Image: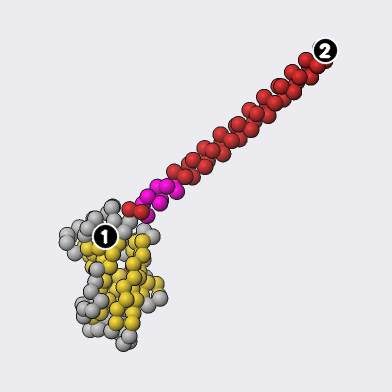
């Protein structure tokens, strides 16, 4: 009978040791998962609060300036947070080609500040290398993951 109690005690101690080891690993894993969810959640929240809308009139002659070979796009911040106006942080694709930041100019229309607040409009001017051919053209503006496309005809 004593041998039965001793073997049960050994099995019980082994089970407690295994349970402690498994719980330690699980606590560490759950901590890592929780941190990952928090980081990803902040990123998703920022993207959800970002919203832009191109408000340029596609039937207007104000979009393309053939004299200076520029395209002007009016973009409104319809999101819930201020957005960057630095050309390095605003991606522009024109007719399927990436436009380098040095070929774009961004000005906040309603104020003279560099902050593009909620409800404000920016004037995005794209300097082109050459005149545009007649036909359809596309300007895509991407800010913090939100993308808007302007299609217009020359």
Horizontally, is 42 left or right of 57 in the view?
right
Residue 69: image location, x then y, percent: 27, 81
Residue 77, labelled with which disc? 1
Residue 153: image location, x then y, percent: 29, 82
Which of the 4 image quadrants contains residue 132? bottom left
Location of residue 63 with respect to 105 vertically, above or below: below
Q: Main secondary structure of the magenta part?
A: helix
Residue at position x 74%, y 23% in the image: 11
Q: Which residues are magenta?
A: 39-47
Residue at position x 40%, y 75% in the image: 97
Residue at position x 61%, y 35% in the image: 25
* Quarter of the figure that contains the C terminus: bottom left
- For discs 1 and 2, the disc positioned in front in the rendered view: 2
Q: Which residue is identified by label 2?
A: 1
Which of the 4 image quadrants contains residue 141? bottom left
Residue 154, labelled with which disc? none
């Amino acid at each position: 009978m004593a041998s039965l109690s001793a073997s049960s005690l050994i099995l019980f101690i082994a089970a407690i040791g295994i349970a402690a080891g498994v719980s330690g690993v699980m606590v560490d894993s759950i901590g890592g998962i929780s941190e990952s969810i928090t980081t990803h959640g902040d990123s998703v929240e920022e993207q959800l609060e970002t919203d832009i809308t191109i408000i340029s009139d596609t039937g207007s002659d104000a979009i393309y300036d053939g004299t200076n070979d520029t395209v002007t796009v009016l973009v409104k911040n319809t999101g819930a947070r201020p957005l960057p106006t630095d050309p390095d942080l605003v991606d522009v694709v024109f007719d399927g080609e990436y436009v380098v930041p040095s070929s774009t100019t961004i000005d906040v229309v309603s104020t003279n500040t560099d902050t593009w607040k909620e409800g404000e409009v920016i004037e995005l001017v794209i300097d082109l290398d050459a005149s545009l051919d007649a036909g359809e053209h596309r300007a895509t503006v991407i800010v913090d993951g939100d993308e808007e496309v302007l299609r217009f005809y020359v």
